[in-house]
Image (cartoon, rainbow, N blue to C red):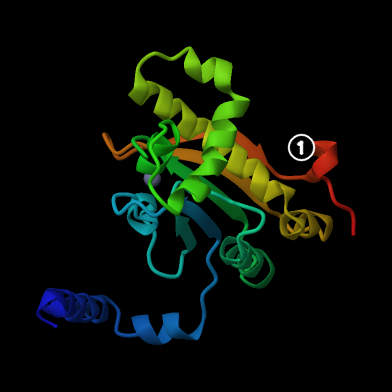
Amino acid sequence: MPNLEKLFENNRNWAKGQLADDADYFRRLSSLQSPQFLWIGCSDSRVPANQILGLAPGEVFVHRNIANLVIHTDMNCLSVLQYGVEVLQVQDIIVCGHYGCGGVRAACENAQLGLIDNWLRNIKDTYSRHWAELEGIEDIMARSDRLCDLNVLAQVHSVSHTTIVQNAWRRGQPLAVHGLVYSLHDGLLRDLAVRITSPDQIEDIYTMVA
Ligand SMILES: [Zn+2]
């Protein structure tokens, strides 16, 4: 596996470095994880959760997919959400988009790209709901970046609409859902100033009582 040789070398050096700093490091981490945060972000290779947040292994539970979508029929995302909330008892769920997102940009256009068109349809639905505002932005990059914001806001609500999150609130579990956007240009996170912490903040039609 010549292509992977460098990676194994990196890995050996990394493990050695960790042990040099803390001889107990792997023994301690292998026995438990109790992250405070669940990160739902884009698969884009330039948006790595741990590095951006300055968090070590064990401190953030991560789910990533193209354009950070939370779709109510996606067993993968819902399973991460359920495990994170009910078993790991995370306290903060961060939905993080990023400006310059290729998935969001593709959703603004009309070319067929294959299977992924079905995934990106979810972003087109958000575009459609905010059509007047978005069509009013002439610059295509600026329009796409505004759609990144709106997509994050839609996914924050989608997380909050799940029975997983609503049941946690009803049990009295402290749990906040946040919306952030990351900029590839300066490496900084922007807070979209949305923070949902109870069923009172979601539309009545989406509240679900057990
Ligand atoms: Zn992206």
Q: Is residue 21 visible to us here? A: yes
Q: Residue at x 66, y 66 (%)?
A: 82
Task: Work out which residue is located at the far right of the displayed protein and give it.
Answer: 210
Residue drawn at point x = 26 percent, y = 76 percent: 18
Q: Which residue corresponds to mark 1? A: 201
Residue 115, quarter of the rendered image: bottom left
Q: Residue at x 55, y 61 (%)?
A: 36
Res. 210 image quadrant: bottom right
Where's the N terminus, which quadrant? Answer: bottom left
Residue 111: image x %, image y %? 38, 37
Q: Image point 29% across, 39% down: which residue?
A: 184
Q: Amino acid at mark 1?
A: Gln
Q: Does residue 75 sit above or below 127 in this rendering? A: below
Image quarter for ligand 1 equals top left
- In the rendered view, does 186 fall on the left or right side of 63? left
Q: Secondary structure at mark 1?
A: helix
Residue 9 in picture, x, y percent from top left: 13, 79
Name the foreground residue: 196 vs 73: 73
Taking 171 as reference, is 46 above or below it? above
Front residue (pair 116, 133): 116
Say which quarter of the image contains residue 38: bottom right
Q: Position of residue 169 (x, y in %)?
A: 78, 54
Q: Is residue 193 visible?
A: no
Height in image: 68 above or below 85? above
Q: How many marks?
A: 1
Q: Position of residue 157 (x, y in %)?
A: 66, 42
Neighbour class for label 1 at 10 Å: few (<14), some, many (≥20)? few
Mark 1 C-beta to ligand 1 under 8 Å: no
